[in-house]
Image (tube, grey):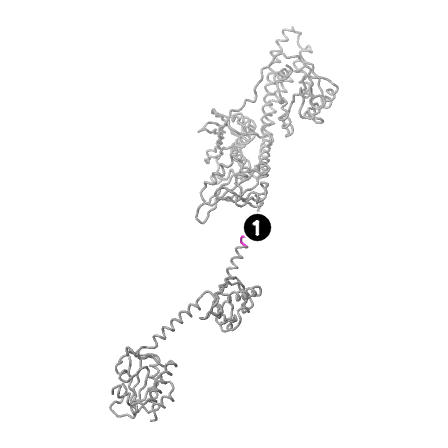
Amino acid sequence: MAKGDGKKRALHLRLYIAGNAPNSIRAVANAKAICIEHYDDDCVLEIVDMLEQPLRALEDEIIVTPTLLRLQPLPVRRVIGSLNDTGQVLLALGPK
Amino acid sequence: MTPHTALRTRDLTQRLAEAEATIEALLSGQVDAVVDSRSMTPVLLTKAQDALRASEERYRRIVETATEGIWAVDESSQTTFVNGQMARMLGYSAEEMIGIPMPKFVGGAHRSAAEITVQKHRQGESVIEDSTLHRKDGSEIWVRVSAAPIYDSAGKYIGGLAMITDRTQHRAAEEALRRSEEQYRQIVETTSDGIIQLDHTDMIVFANHPAAEMLGYQPSEVVGKPFSLVTVPGETEASQTARQRPLGTSASWDGSLRRRDGAEVVVSMTITPIVGRDADRVGRIAVIRDVTERRKLQAQLMVSDRMASVGTMAAGVAHEINNPLAAVLANLDYIAESLVRLSSGDRAPISYAARDAWICEEIKPSLDDAREAADRVRFIVRDLKMFSRSPSEERTGPVNVKSIMESSLRMAWNEVRHRARLVKNYGHIPDVDANEARLGQVFLNLIVNAAQALPEGRAEDNEIQVSTRLDAERVIIEVRDTGAGIPAENRTRIFDAFFTTKGVGEGTGLGLAICYRIVKDIGGDLTVESEMGVGTTFRVSLPIAKAEATESVATPPVPTAGRRGRILLVDDEVMVIRALTRILSQGNEVVSTLEAKDALARCERGEQFDLILCDLMMPIMTGMELYHELLRVAPEQANRMIFVTGGAFTEKARTFLSETLREHIEKPFSSANLRAIVNRYLN
């Protein structure tokens, strides 16, 4: 679970992964790096393993992993893939 | 938040963008899992990918670990794929070979064949062929190509796939095998020994040139024929025995084979069974050596050894002859002197009756002594003759062991008498099948050896014992001495040729070796027992003769008075003529001549004789020549010839007598014997 749950953050992210599959591991690493480098760690990153919590994935209408959801600010946005292309990811997440 | 509300909150464009991103992620391989739409459960993509990858990997491994080279070409024969083994075989990297037409790698001599292969492929044929390929370093390798065409799903030819095996080593092995075979063939064909291979039915399956030549054939003429084509009946027994020998052991024996022209060739043969893969005897190999020459040499060697023995004995023999000869001379001198005294009137005149009495008392005993002494000389000379027979006279037949032993003892007496007492212990034994001269040679050798084992002088202290006995259907002859004995280390070698303990020049080392050979040749055995300080015994064991010896000295009954006849004597020895004239003049008319030519002249002139007594060997014209001449000019006279011989036969003389069947008298002869023969002829 991401840190600083008590404090309201500007950016709330949820990353759906599938165990330690290669793209999932890469996506986790990329997401963490982006939070630190581009949002001064001022974001909530929640990581959900679809293999462990399939119902949550169903609820969020996840059909492939890795999928990154931007829950806050609204509207909800999805980025699919291993998050290698930092430029495209930042474009989807919006400015700080 | 429910799916429905979520659906409502999104607009269509965003969903399309998301779908696009999803597809893009899928295509670029950034997706790990998808949710199966029916079961609504996540499925890991990696598992499927792994399976695919594993399958690919498996095939790749097979292709790369194959010991064969794998080579794929497209429809224009350009290389599209080679495995590592193929690239290594040719010394290239796989990448270097891609795109190069396969025929470029094929050796010049096989390029056209390779093109034909491609043609065949187009027609749908698979091809297996041997070819050469160029390596990158310029060398060539031999390969076996097994190629098949490849078609697309529409049945169109799109190239070929070939499996390639390096046959260079194989070729080298084949070449080595060929060379090895060639080498063995050369050995087999250049050896002077004959080599014949027989199958299990004794059929000749191979014969080298020397074997065929020995037998008067070409190799091709004996192959496929039974071995009995060249064997001599009766000798197959030895061959049969050889067949029953245990595997891996060869049998050797001397025997005869039959040549194409019917002549027999004396061979030494070694037959070895040969074994097939199933450990069954598949046949035999016979190695044959022509020993005709060796046999001749051996016979010569035996004769020369015998002559050497006789030579060694010469001094002793001279002594043996001199003693009786002295007695003959002394007695004759005495008689002559007595007769002179009788006629010179040294003593008072005596009556005729007194003179007759005196002759009986004084002369007759001297004459008898002289006669007895002369007889002894005759025996010794007969012994000498026995030892000096030529090989051509060496016939084997039943012989009397005791008389041969006696002859040998007389010959060796001079060696024996200074060294030992001689003890004879003759048991009653039958005759043996042997040759007199050879058996005499054996005995003489054993006796002389026994004598030489003893120190000279002190003859009473030592003993040589000669004994004969019958033991289990074999005649045993033993020569025992009381000498020092033979050391154990020498005992096994004493029958070896050239083994001698005597000094150089004292012995040839052949004596016992030859004895052994002689005894073995007549089916006997020669053994030795020796105890140091006690003595040595040589034992000859011989099979009993199949037939009894024919009595050779059948004394004919003496007809006292014969018809008066006219006799011609022909002899180059005056003394013989005179003696014969004296003996035969009583009751016959005797004409004599020293020359055969003279005899011939008389017959040519028409003189008639009832009997012609003729010496066989004469310097100018021999008795044999006279006979042949007479056959021409006066055949009736030729048939009245009797020959007188001194015994030293030449081969020619022997053949002459056996072919013409003319009667002959051997010198020396007694007057009674001579008269008997002459009277028989005249009557």
The picture places residue A70, in percent across and down from the top left corner, at 31, 89
Q: Report whether residue B509 is seen.
A: no
- Label 1 Cα crowd, 10 Å radius (few <14 / some 14-19 / many 20+): few
Q: On screen, B95 above or below B532?
A: below
For the residue pair B544 and B25, the one nearer the viewer reads as B25
Is B27 displayed left or right of B327 in the figure? left
Residues drawn in magenta: B179-183
What residue type is disc 1 on?
Answer: Gln
For the residue pair B624 and A65, the one nearer the viewer reads as A65
Specify the farthest residue to the right: B605
Find disc 1 in the rendering and name its residue. B186
Q: Quadrant of residue A36?
A: bottom left
Q: Tag 1, which secondary structure? A: helix
The picture places residue A96, in percent across and down from the top left corner, at 33, 93
Prevailing SS of the magenta stretch: helix
For the residue pair B570 and B680, the one nearer the viewer reads as B680
Q: Is residue B235 magenta?
A: no
Q: Quadrant of residue B211?
A: top right
Q: Report whether residue A57 is seen.
A: yes
